[in-house]
Image (cartoon, rainbow, N blue to C red):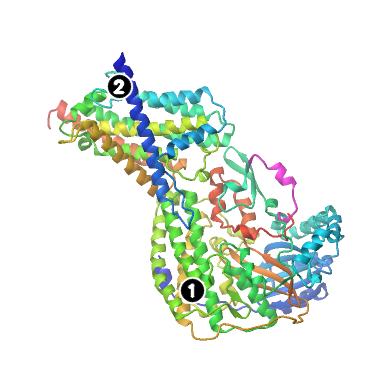
């Protein structure tokens, strides 16, 4: 009983600290890339900046609804089935991959409900479009997970990591890894995590829903991005497997932050994509066809090896 | 692309026969004209309010003139009477004229009488230590209801011939009817002079109205009763992004009246600095657009390039934004060879960097997808609203004051006027890049042509008796054709009326916003390059 409590505290400490560090780096990079002119150099992104920002959100008066609480709650629930190390899992379950993806979908639904409260039909229109885009990215995501499951023949995350003790899955599924990266990158774009100037943001995330509601939304955004990165590390980069003499837990952290930084830098180098037609074009003309091809190649390979035993 | 444009050789300017048009006007309009005169490259036509119908129909329908464009309608009060200025232009015959309509004396408002008798007001006048109070223009119209009704009637008469005249009406009903969505001025960066009222169906805009009344300022007599030699220090504030153009325009006007000739070197240096300002303005435009698009890398890169150009401007004039460099009959100071050499070195670097900036911005499919087919302006719409400058050229109409008029010494220099094809946002961005390359080309030619000549003239205007006289001058500023109408007496300015290009782009935006999406509002307005300082004027009556 005590050990479960300790585990809960550990998991939320890990998530909380990484949320803090992650948002610190987001602000740091955003602040660094701003061209500073004259004598008014703004210090954007000190160590205490995220904490300061949380208080800034809470300072403003706003109505707090039930859905805001649910959003905050479920944004932490998605970590329940994720194995952080060999021991640190809150609930052991055989098919935890499916359950954690279900939690992700619940979070997306909560986004839609949360936005439908908006008084302004125009703003709701814009935001709901983006949320629907988030849903549509699940198609290539599921296709790639299916082809990965075909290789590993299990739905348990812990077993998937265990099977990668010799070769990482990225060797068998390089296309799948790239598509995962693309999806995470597009999620960051849709949420506008690295935006410094909210005024130019077509859909007014920044204007409506200040206060606690805004904080809940922001934390949920970060949690979704972190969740997808952790999933990528577990599925393709062998999670907490030791790397020669380096400890597995440190490797987990390293891989997580390397992917995180790559995505942040790509995000800074590309323009904003809040144009829904372009997002659908990326999904339907690029991501989904490639993942279908990936899936077919995997099936053919699987059949040749396991059914006809040719390879 | 940049290299091909840069290395080509192109013909110089077109010749304008203003005298022929002046004679034709006299022949066709005869006794309907009170007065007609040539002022530099422009014509000032003085008529009475009764003849407005006849004159406008003749100007529009007679193939000798075929004046298609109405640029702006400006009201100004003078000593004996009040006047309405119509700035008109003809594409096909390549001339422009100012129609000055005499409205007669209008009843004074109670407020203005109160002002005259007010002690505080008279005290503040005396504190300004003005010797001649007779030059001061009190705003004796002050928007009485009777006057505004009469004003609207006149504009309705004009709108029979020029439909965009309706935009200059004093209209409060529109603002109340169009208000599904109100975008307050602070939301848009640098565009803090209007509130945007939008009527929308879901995310499609049905009607848009820009309320400019918030841009009114109280400094009514900022330019009147000032010595015209003193004005040069503050006139650059009329255009904050390209401050040299009001200065040049004003000096050309005064030199034309006083018949002062400037040396070749003075004109060349004026051209050089105006091209530098054009480059800096266009780079600033690119920075603004990339900020709207969310391309942070391009935004920062563009600002760094602008910094280089601004530093050269600072080296030459002493100031980055308000140069105060042009003088009547000359310049503030000569440019040494060392200063010109720094520009020569910097030009190559700027050229390479802007070329790479263009590839970074416009070779990106995300950005071009966003810019393409948005905010399309047809040729007809552009002519209807009297657009000028790069916004007009992006629709496919080749019109530039530098080539179509005999402005400064542009006729001695080979350069191309870039023209767009579709008139959408992408064309508008592309045309700015091409103009930067052309400006660099012009500067390189000027640097080779500069010779040793004196640039200063010591002129004293104290106690000179100049009779009451009026003049117009126009230049091609980065936003479009920029005109200044002046009324002088002795050494004082009675009225200074800037006729600016951004107002036409703004009215055009009201039309092209219809049918586009709410999310594109900022992009469309930013792509038109409106200069906010052009709107803080007392002469419009909306």
Residue A287 picture quarter: top left
| Magenta-highlighted residues | B167-181
Q: Which residue is mark 1?
A: B415
Question: Is B109 situated left or right of B3 in this image?
Answer: right
Q: Chain of mark 1?
A: B
Indicate the position of residue B137 as horizontal and vertical percent values: 79, 66
Q: Which residue is mark 2?
A: A96
The mark lying in front, picked from 2 and 1, is: 2
Label 2 to label 1: alpha-carbon separation: 69 Å
Indicate the position of residue B450 as horizontal and vertical percent values: 48, 82
Name the residue located 24 percent from the left edge and 34 percent from the top edge: A250
Q: Any magenta on residue B152?
A: no
- The quarter of the picture where the N terminus of chain B appears is bottom left
Residue A259 picture quarter: top left
Of residue B60 and residue B502, the one placed in the foreground of this image is B502
Q: Is residue A302 above or below residue B146?
A: above
Indicate the position of residue A94 as horizontal and vertical percent values: 26, 18
Answer yes or no: are tags 2 and 1 on the same subunit.
Answer: no
């Amino acid at each position: 009983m005590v050990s479960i409590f300790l585990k809960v505290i550990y998991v939320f400490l890990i998530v909380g600290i990484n949320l803090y560090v992650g948002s610190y780096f987001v602000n740091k990079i955003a602040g660094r890339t701003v061209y500073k002119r004259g004598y008014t150099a703004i210090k954007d992104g000190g160590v205490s900046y995220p904490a300061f920002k949380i208080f800034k959100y809470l300072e403003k008066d706003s109505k707090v609804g039930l859905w805001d609480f649910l959003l905050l709650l479920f944004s932490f629930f998605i970590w329940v089935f994720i194995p952080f190390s060999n021991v640190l899992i809150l609930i052991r379950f055989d098919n935890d991959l499916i359950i954690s993806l279900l939690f992700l979908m619940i979070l997306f639904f909560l986004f839609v409900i949360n936005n439908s409260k908006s008084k302004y039909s125009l703003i709701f229109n814009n935001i709901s479009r983006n949320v629907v885009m988030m849903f549509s990215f699940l198609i290539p995501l599921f296709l790639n997970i299916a082809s990965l499951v075909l290789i590993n023949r299990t739905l348990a995350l812990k077993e998937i990591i265990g099977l990668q003790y010799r070769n990482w899955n990225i060797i068998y599924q390089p296309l799948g890894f790239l598509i995962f990266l693309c999806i995470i990158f597009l999620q960051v774009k849709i949420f506008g995590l690295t935006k410094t100037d909210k005024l130019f943001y077509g859909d007014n995330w920044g204007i409506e829903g200040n206060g606690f509601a805004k904080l809940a939304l922001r934390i949920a955004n970060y949690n979704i991005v972190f969740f997808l990165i952790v999933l990528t590390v577990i599925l393709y980069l062998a999670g907490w497997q030791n790397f020669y003499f380096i400890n597995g837990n440190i490797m987990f952290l390293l891989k997580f932050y390397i992917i995180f930084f790559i995505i942040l830098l790509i995000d800074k180098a590309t323009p904003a994509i809040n144009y829904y037609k372009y997002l659908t074009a990326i999904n339907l003309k690029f991501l989904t066809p490639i993942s279908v091809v990936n899936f077919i190649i995997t099936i053919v390979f699987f059949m040749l090896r396991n059914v006809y035993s040719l390879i | 692309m940049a290299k091909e444009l840069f290395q080509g050789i192109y013909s110089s300017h077109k010749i304008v026969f203003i005298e022929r048009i002046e004679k034709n006007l006299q022949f066709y309009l005869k006794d309907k004209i009170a007065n007609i005169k040539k002022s530099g490259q422009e014509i000032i036509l003085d008529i009475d309010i009764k003849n407005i119908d006849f004159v406008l129909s003749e100007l529009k329908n007679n193939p000798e003139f075929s004046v298609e464009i109405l640029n702006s309608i400006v009201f100004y009060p003078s000593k004996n009477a009040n006047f309405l200025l119509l700035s008109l232009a003809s594409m096909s015959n390549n001339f422009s004229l100012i129609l000055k309509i005499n409205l007669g004396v209008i009843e004074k408002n109670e407020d203005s009488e109160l002002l005259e008798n007010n002690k505080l007001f008279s005290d503040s006048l005396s504190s300004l230590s003005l010797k001649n109070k007779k030059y001061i223009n009190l705003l004796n119209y002050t928007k009485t209801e009777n006057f505004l009704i009469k004003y609207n009637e006149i504009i309705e008469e004009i709108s029979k011939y020029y439909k965009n005249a309706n935009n200059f009406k004093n209209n409060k009903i529109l603002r109340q009817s169009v208000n599904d969505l109100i975008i307050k001025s602070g939301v848009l960066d640098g565009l803090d002079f209007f509130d945007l009222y939008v009527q929308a169906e879901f995310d499609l805009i049905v009607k848009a109205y820009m309320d400019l009344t918030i841009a009114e300022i109280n400094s009514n007599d900022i330019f009147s009763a000032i010595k015209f030699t003193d004005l040069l220090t503050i006139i650059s504030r009329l255009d904050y992004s390209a401050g040299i153009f009001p200065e040049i325009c004003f000096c050309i006007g005064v030199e034309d009246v006083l018949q002062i000739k400037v040396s070749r070197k003075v004109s060349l240096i004026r051209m050089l600095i105006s091209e530098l300002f054009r480059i800096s303005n266009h780079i600033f435009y690119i920075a603004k657009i990339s900020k709207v698009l969310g391309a942070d890398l391009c935004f920062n890169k563009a600002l760094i390039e602008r910094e280089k150009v601004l530093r050269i401007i600072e080296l030459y004039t002493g100031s980055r934004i308000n140069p105060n460099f042009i003088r009547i009959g000359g310049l503030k100071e000569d440019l040494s060879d060392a200063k010109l050499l720094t520009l020569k070195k910097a030009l190559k670097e700027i050229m390479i960097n802007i070329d790479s900036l263009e590839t970074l911005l416009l070779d990106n499919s995300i950005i071009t997808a966003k810019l393409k087919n948005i905010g399309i302006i047809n040729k007809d719409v552009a002519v209807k609203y009297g657009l000028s400058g790069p916004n007009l050229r992006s629709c496919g109409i080749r019109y530039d004051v530098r080539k179509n008029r005999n402005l400064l010494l542009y006729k001695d220099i080979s350069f191309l006027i870039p023209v767009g094809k579709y008139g959408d946002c992408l064309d508008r961005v592309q045309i700015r890049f091409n103009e930067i390359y052309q400006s660099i080309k012009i500067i390189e030619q000027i640097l080779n042509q500069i010779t040793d000549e004196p640039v200063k003239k010591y002129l004293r205007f104290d106690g000179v008796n100049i009779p009451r006289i009026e003049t117009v001058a126009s230049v091609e500023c980065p936003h479009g054709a920029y005109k200044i109408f002046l009324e002088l007496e002795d050494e004082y300015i009675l009225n200074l009326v800037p006729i600016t290009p951004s107002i036409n782009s703004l009215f055009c935006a009201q039309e092209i916003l219809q049918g586009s999406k709410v999310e594109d509002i900022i992009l469309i307005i930013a792509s038109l390059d409106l200069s906010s300082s052009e709107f803080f004027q007392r002469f419009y009556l909306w």
